Image: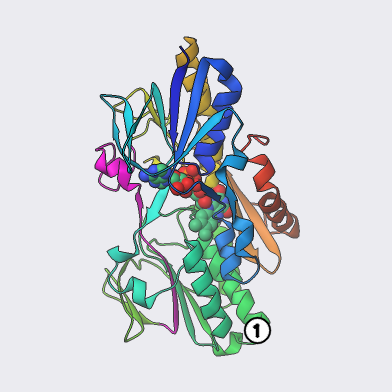
Amino acid sequence: MPARVVVLGGGVGGTLVANLLSKRLGRDATVTVVDGSGMHVYQPGFLYVALGQADALWLARDERTLLRKDVELVVENAARVDPTAQVVQLVRGGTIPYDHLVLATGSRIVREQIPGLVAGAHDFYSLDGALRLREALRTFRGGRVVIGVAGIPYKCPPAPVEFTLMVEELLRHKGLRSRSQVTLLSPLNRAFTVEPASKLVQPIMEKRGIELQTFFNVESVDPDKHTVSSLEGETVEYDLAILVPPHRGAKVLEDSGLVDDGGWVPTDRATLQHTAHERIFALGDATDLPISKSGSTAHFEAPIVASRIASLIKGTAPREAYTGRVMCFLETGNGRATALRFDYAHPPTPPTPSRMWHWAKWAFNRAYWITVPQGRIA
Ligand SMILES: Cc1cc2nc3c(=O)[nH]c(=O)nc-3n(C[C@H](O)[C@H](O)[C@H](O)COP(=O)(O)OP(=O)(O)OC[C@H]3O[C@@H](n4cnc5c(N)ncnc54)[C@H](O)[C@@H]3O)c2cc1C
């Protein structure tokens, strides 16, 4: 009887791992993806939508069109995982049994965790949020723009810095720069988590007159007074606040008792197995690994998960291990970008921002649909 592999979540990690498993295992396994929406969303595009540089239609595709024909797709939310009975319970009733389970449920944003955030601040971390922010930027006539992070960890660590540099550029193009002040609030002692990249972008920010306010952990937003306050006791005024909301892991995993206090799956950093359940693997944003939550992380983890599950099914010795590999682009504005390539053992040494990396990012954005989900680029 073929082994039953169930993949929870049809985002970057889940789609790729399902396709790789089906390719590797053929008739030795049935592969089923369970996804709540049945639509695959390319989230890096939210940033361009918010800036008015891309159409929202470009960002979503029917998940079915991205999966190999022999992968089954169940469009329904999972309510709970029972690791003892080895079943996934669906919200509308019914269960799906598994021999091996992959948790690829990503992360969710929880705006309500910060008082005043919903009414007082914009963000570009969902399609709705990006569309609302696009309208706010379209009608903005100058003033204090405050951009920041309202909780750690959050996905795509460079995104707030990228967005700050791109907003500054937008204000210049619209002739509003002299009437505007741009401030990045960072909870750390630098622009963002990755230290070598912070060292690269901070001088660029300084040159462009962008203020960096460090050790600012957002505690609340006051939508009436137009202020953001920090746990450290500081308050800044804004005319336009753009704050990355706090993130948590998927609720289904919390309800199943499979995660830590933040909602993240305790995951072995090399094998990507759940530390308490050897038949459960995790990848992408869902894990508690000390590495960026990014599509690229999920992309590099997927072949490891697929190879290890294939070994378990075929009874061969698993050989591949995840090394913490990540590769992200970082737009610095003015048509330039840099690239961050690193792993657990090697911090990034980002090249000087150039047009080449900017175009590489654009080419990647365009080629995403026909490359990453199918495993065509490693
Ligand atoms: C503005 C922005 C810019 C970004 N830029 C970049 C970038 O430049 N480079 C980069 O590498 N990454 C970037 N990212 C991050 C990247 O998009 C995520 O890290 C990546 O999508 C994570 O992949 P994943 O497979 O773990 O989760 P996701 O792609 O989020 O997929 C999770 C899936 O699980 C499903 N799901 C959740 N709960 C359930 C349930 N109970 N039942 C069934 N299905 C469920 C969801 O419907 C979803 O389809 C960016 C993100 C944002 C928001």
Q: Quadrant of residue 296?
A: top right
Q: Quadrant of residue 371?
A: top right
**How is the structure coloured here?**
rainbow
Toward the top, the furthest residue is 315
Mark 1 neighbour density, 10 Å: few (under 14) some (14–19) many (20 or more): few
Q: Position of residue 313 (x, y in %)?
A: 47, 14
* Residue that mark 1 sits on: 174
State which quarter of the image contains the C terminus: top right
Q: Position of residue 341 (x, y in %)?
A: 59, 44
Q: Which amino acid type is marked by label 1?
A: Lys
Q: In the rendered view, would you say 153 is above or below 139?
A: above
For image coordinates 56% across by 44% down, the residue present is: 63
Question: Left or right of 334: which side holds 320?
Answer: left
State which quarter of the image contains the N terminus: top left
* Extent of the magenta region: 238-265
For image coordinates 32% across by 86% down, the residue present is: 225
Question: Left or right of 309: which side holds 352?
Answer: right
Q: In the rendered view, would you say 30 is above or below 377?
A: above
